[in-house]
Structure formats: C-alpha cells, structure tokens
Amino acid sequence: MKITKVEPILVDRYLFVQVHTDEGLVGLGESGAWGFHESAAAAVTKFGEYLVGEDPLRIEHHWQYLYRAFHFRGADIMGALSAIDIALWDLAGQYRDAAVHALLGGAVRERARVYQHVVGTTRQELVDGVKAAKEQGFTAVGHLTPFLDEDRSLPYFSTHAAKIGRAIEAVGAYRDAVGDDVDLCIEIHRRLTPAEAVQLGVGIAEFRPQFLEDPVTPDNFDEMEYVASRVDVPIATGERLTSIWEFAMLLRRSAVQFVRPNVGMVGGITGAKKIAALAEAQHVGVVPHNPLSPVLTAASLQIAAAIPNFALLEYPGRTWHSLLADRPDGAEIVTGQPEYDGHGFLLVDASPGIGVKLRADVTERVPYVPRPVKARLSVDGSVIDQ
C-alpha cells in the first residue's frame, strides 16, 4: 500500500487532512493549530511532497522524518504533523480492521468520562449552564471561567480586589448550583499574573475544583511551578505545548497535576501516547485538550481508551467560546461520531481506525470561516490576555 495524495481540507473553523492510498483506503486527521489553519495547511502540503509514494504503515518513521527534517517547529508545523499522524493511524486501523486503541495495546476502559463546555457572558448564564450540564447527565463541566466570556471588542477594566473577589464568588456560585454531583474544571485562559493566580487558587480551594487550568501564560514553566507550589488546587496545563520535551520539563518541576495534550498539536496519536506515558510515571492524570471537531474527539477517544492515567476528555458544546458564535452540528461534518451515553461518558467502540468519516460534500455543507486576529484591550488601550 502506498500513499497517493495528502489533502488539506478547510471546513468552518477546522483543518482536516485526508491521506489517500492506492488501495482506496483514506485516513482522516485534524490539526489543533486552530489560530493558523492557513499556514498549517501549507505545511501539510509541504509534508505531502515527502509522503506520496511512501508506505503509510511506517508511522513512527514518518513522524521522525517530518519532525527532524527541517528543525523548524512550533504550532503550525506540529499541527500539520499531528493531523497527518492521526490520518496514518486511521489508515493503519482500517487496514488491519481494528480500532486505533486496539493497535495501542487494547482498551483499558469501555467508556471515557467527559466534561461539557459551559460559557456565558453573565454570571447567571454561567450558573444556568452548569445546572443544564448536570441535567444532561454530565458529572464534570469545564471551559468554565470564574470571569465572564465577554466579547473581546469590549475594553476591560477591574480593580484587583473586584477581579479576584468576584472570581472567587463565581466559583462558589457554581458549586452551590450543583453541589458535589459535578466536578468543576476552572478555566483561566492564561489571563492572570503568577501572584494573582496564587491569590485566586487559595481563595477557591474550599470549593474543591478538580483543577485550575492555565492560570498563567505557557511561556515560562518556572511561573507555573511557582503557582503549583503555593496552592492546594491541582493545576492543569499543556494545551499550547507541542512536544514531549516541553511536557517533560513541566513534569520535572512538579508544576502540573493534569497534563492537557492536544492530540492535534503534540504530534498526533504518536506524540500523545508518549506524553501520557511520561505523565503516568509521575502519577499525573491526562485530560486531552479537545476544543474542535468530532474528528479530534474521535482521535482523542483512542488515547483515552488506551492509557491507564486518563482522567477526563474535553467535550465541546455548540458555542465557540472565543467567538460567541454557534458551531456547526457534528453530523454535518462526519459520519460515525462518538456516542454520548447520557451519563457523562463517551462510548468506546471497535470501529476501525478512529471511527469517523468526513462527509464527501462537507466543504459545500460547511464553508470555511477564517479566524480573525482579535486581542482584547484594556480601557487604557494596552493589550490584555483573555
């Protein structure tokens, strides 16, 4: 079996990759570099120059070849490599008539616990969203900010006391809304300084969140270590990282209790499995970052099924948080998307490969929507993190 074409496909706010073969099998993958799909698509095309004519089953060899050929990496390159890797694993599963998790050593669980996105532009919307998730059977909610999911066009200002005080009150309101029946995954989106993050972490500890996610920017691992060493709330991070070596540095510092590899960013299924093994050696849980389409959900589910230290899988809702816009229905994009059991879990099945197929007319059903460059400004005109 030989690769005949490597095809990037832009749909809505997603970048898919299909790897075609001379035996008619087609592998499907997705890039997690959602901010730069156009450049990641160009990298996919470039990588295709090497892959056409190659045996798609030599997955590790192709991973090493593409990763080490140029020594230029980062999100765009790794998003392209990840999408291709997922597609090659999908091909391998189809070729052997087995789910990818079976090729990784077999499933260690029959279903994977997920957390539902909760978004809102007001405190009441967020509280109502937490309650609605519980009513839908979810036992965990995430993407849950203690601030608000405000439009980035709105200038921001708050005093320090109000910023931290209201955030602590918000987490308390979420806990009051659902009691202990739902775990709270508190998302900060890298918007705090280390000192602010510590003050918030100390303040919300009494509400027992499952983790505090991305309290500070991912630029400096020492800052994450500083926060983790001073709060009693577990830290989750890793969605912006792209290699096993970055995760190794975090783990060496004891700066994280839940790693958040994006299968579409860390080198695909190949990279994510290695990161999970690193984390397992430190008794650190794995919560795959999964904010995009059902393709990435299906790929992430293979990792969730195959590793012993899986904790939760992100399961996006119908709203784009950063854009305050509706997502397309998954059935418009793929067939065979993972099934939610109504009780907080996705079912792990034995469908070959990653188990989903891109609809043939998907680009007509769901045209591409480029993402804007849009940061938020303070009332003084300076840029802030959100």
Image (tube, helix red, strand yellow):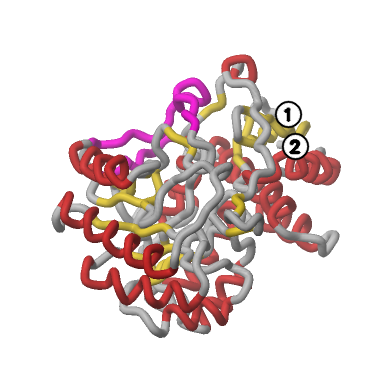
Residue 329, position as x, y percentages in the image? 45, 25
Q: Quarter of the image holding residue 46?
A: top right
Of callouts 2 and 1, which one flags the residue occurring earlier in the amino acid sequence? 2
Q: Pointer 2: residues within 10 angstroms few (<14), some, or many (20+)?
A: some
Closer to us: 32 or 99 = 32
| Camera sees residue 296 | no
Q: What residue is drawn where x is 35% and y is 65%?
A: 211
The image shows residue 132 at horizontal and vertical percentages of 23, 38
Distance CA(mark 2)–CA(mark 1): 6 Å
Say if the magenta span includes residue 326. Answer: yes
Q: Name the residue: 27% across, 43% down.
A: 124
Quarter of the view holding residue 337: top left
Which residue appears at 49% of the width and 37% of the height? 320
The answer to which of 198 and 98 lies nearer the viewer is: 198
User: Which region is colored magenta?
Assistant: 325-351
Q: Is residue 247 above or below residue 336?
A: below
| Label ID, residue 2 | 2
Asked whether the viewer can see residue 122, the reply is yes
Is label 2 in contact with label 1 (beta carbons under 8 Å)? yes
